[in-house]
Amino acid sequence: MKRGTTGGPPRVAVHNNPKIRSAFYQAVVLALVLGCAYAFAVNASANLRAQGFASGFGFLGNTAGFGINQTLIAYSETDSYGRVFVVGLLNTLLVAGLGIVFATILGFIIGIARLSPNWLLARLAGGYVEAIRNLPLLFQILFWYLAVLGTMPGPRDSIGIGLQPILAALGDATAGLGLPAAIVDLWRSLAAWVGPPDVYLNNRGVILPRPLLGAGFEWVAIAFVVAVLAALALRIFARRRLDATGRIFPAGWVGLALIVGLPVAALFALGVPLGFEHPQLRGFNFVGGVRVIPELVALLVALVTYTAAFIAEVVRAGILAVSRGQSEAAQALGLKRGATLRLIVVPQALRVIVPPLTNQYLNLTKNSSLAVAIGYPDLFAVFAGTALNQTHQAIEIIAITMAVYLAISLVTSVLMNWYNARNRLIER
Amino acid sequence: MKRAIFTLGLAIGLGFSAVPASAQTLKAVKDRGSLICGVSQGLPGFSSPDDKGAWTGLDVEFCRAIAAAVFNDPAKVKYTPLSAKDRFEPLKSGEIDVLTRNTTWTLSRDALFNFAGVNYYDGQGFMVRKALKVNSALELNGASVCAQTGTTTELNLGDYFRANNMRYEVIAFATADETVKAYEAGRCDAFTTDVSQLYSEKLKLANANDHVILPEIISKEPLGPVVRHGDDQWLDVVKWVHYAMLNAEELGVNSKNIDEAVKSNVPEIKRLVGTEGNFGEQLGLTKDWAVRIVKHVGNYGEVFDRNVGTGSRLGISRGINRLWTKGGIQYAPPIR
């Protein structure tokens, strides 16, 4: 066969074929990496066995024996390490989930405030961002925990949040001013009539009444689901009508009214099947009710304020990235300021905001492992901390913990990438 | 996350080290020219740096005694401060030669490591504010209790409250300092740990006299030095350093009269100071190993008094840590 006559590429020897060569090199590298990993696993397991350490995941079924101060599922000392893992994971997800929601809200408010034409508001927002993002997070967590905790009273001097303490204070004030006893008695009898407050604040946390759901309460839940579905349907209808006729339907407000109104109506129609378990001071602390532990509050406040400072900058950058001509054009069309923001600026800004926002969400989730410093029982503290120390199975526990953080981060990324893809610029 | 990386590093170290790190510790220490001890991050009386940065305490003196026996120089020690949570992994991986960090001897730990004796018999107790007017740990139903994570303390606490049908809330912190700070800030009604440590932490509190240590001892906490599995020679060295100090006290040999003791004609003292037999050499040390220990560091009683006993700020009475001849349970096998 002569070269050039067939029209195909020139023939080369197999070992000179660039495709085969590169495949060969990649196969060699892959084999080396896998070989290393295999040698690592075999060697580690042999070394551990030589020193008498167990390996494998059998320990997950053993009894843990230690207590945890915040558990979203039932847990006692007699439960297994596997359950400790679930308790820790849920606590991590709780603080990360709440943190992401609040940090987003606060971050957007501050980011927009920093662009406000109001001089004071813009400077305050700027000062906030610079002060918060330049201090180490661990320091902020310890500050919120120790400084704020230190100013709270003990359980026996709890701050009651309600009408009674205010009325009682008014009574004391009138007595102090030397006003007639009748007025003092009036305030005091009013205070007695109102009864003790249900929300307390002390250095053991915030104590709230626990809602007790009566028979028939499931209908309220059903009403809520129906209202949410109706609101979604309304939104689609409003969008279609807008496209077809150009008339705006206030789907947002009507939807909100539905979501709030329908369950409330159902609640009253059923004769309010809802009671409250009131917290009562007994012994060292309040018994009954729901308690939000100060570790959760401190960690959440620190994570939210810290991450919000970064989100604010992301939001500001996103809004500034939308060219000024866009909002001028919207104004020229007669759109109000709110509508301009909502319909023109924010959708375009989101394209710039979402990718760095994802980073902030991932940071917040990973930073939540600093919880160990203030005794919040997250996955890292109870599982990669106490459980690791009791079982000595470092490799297994660290591997599980890494896999969990990786999985949480990947799920967050996938969701945010999906959202970003929805918002991306559709070019014609 | 720092701790995770640390632990992971150790795990990787274990994966790649070809020889188990356990063999030949004595030779490794001699070749290196210094001993590496794992100590606490600052527990006055047991191991804490003084105002000049030098480490002091009962556990530290034990390290100095080993160094004295091996090198005839108690200063040839490097100290690695470790948290309760991270104390075993460095020992496992060979980063430290001996862990002298007020560590409780338990079955599950002994199954993985070797305990070389008990240099302090302790027990877990509670400290509360005097203002609470609590006189017994049995009155702590419903209390919030601060503890340090990664300790036997957490487990004993669970057992005690469960056994007595009492409710409690445990708040577990990574380090002792954070635990004490939270207790001081009023987050918990009680602070629980080994009683010796309670005395030591009480000194650090702003108003030490507002706090009281409850009489109940809820657990057995024999504290002692720990070495790796699989190195019997090193285990024997560490074990006998402790026994030499106990035997010296029993025979009345201390750092002040050691020079006379060397000339003694009493057979037991002669065997201790090495003028009879070759006991030190059997351990891989020199004949005068015990003389070195007592001269440079002292006997057990001296070390106890100086660091935690009546001669120290802690002022803990000797209690069950007295010699068996004086009604305690500190007992050493004979040198012969």
Image (spheres, rainbow, N blue to C red):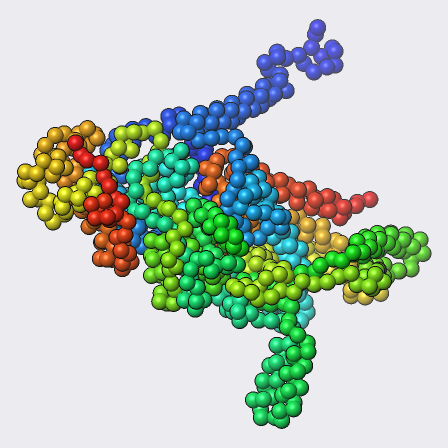
Quarter of the image holding residue A128? bottom right
Position of residue B61 measured from the top left corner of the image (x, y, whole percent)? 24, 47
For the residue pair B177 and A139, the one nearer the viewer reads as: B177
In the image as oriented, which residue stretches furthest toward the top? A1
Left or right of B226 on screen, residue B242:
left
Q: Is residue B67 visible?
A: no
Quarter of the image holding residue A124? bottom right
For the residue pair A376 and A252, the one nearer the viewer reads as: A376
Position of residue A339 measured from the top left corner of the image (x, y, whole percent)? 80, 62
Image height check: is A354 above or below B93?
Answer: below
Position of residue A243 measured from the top left corner of the image (x, y, whole percent)? 90, 53
Residue shown at 54% from the left, 50% from the top: A68
Image height check: is B294 above or below B229?
Answer: below
Left or right of A323 on screen, residue B36:
left
For the residue pair A381 and A352, the one nearer the viewer reads as: A381
Image height check: is B32 above or below A303?
Answer: above
Residue shown at 36% from the left, 54% from the top: B195
Q: Is residue B135 visible?
A: yes
Question: Looking at the figure, which quarter contains the C terminus of chain B?
Answer: top left
Residue shown at 41% from the left, 67% from the top: B130
Position of residue A101 measured from the top left corner of the image (x, y, whole percent)? 67, 55
Residue shown at 12% from the left, 35% from the top: B271
Image height check: is B19 above or below A10?
Answer: below
Left or right of B280 on screen, residue B51:
right
For the residue pair A225 and A112, the one nearer the viewer reads as: A225
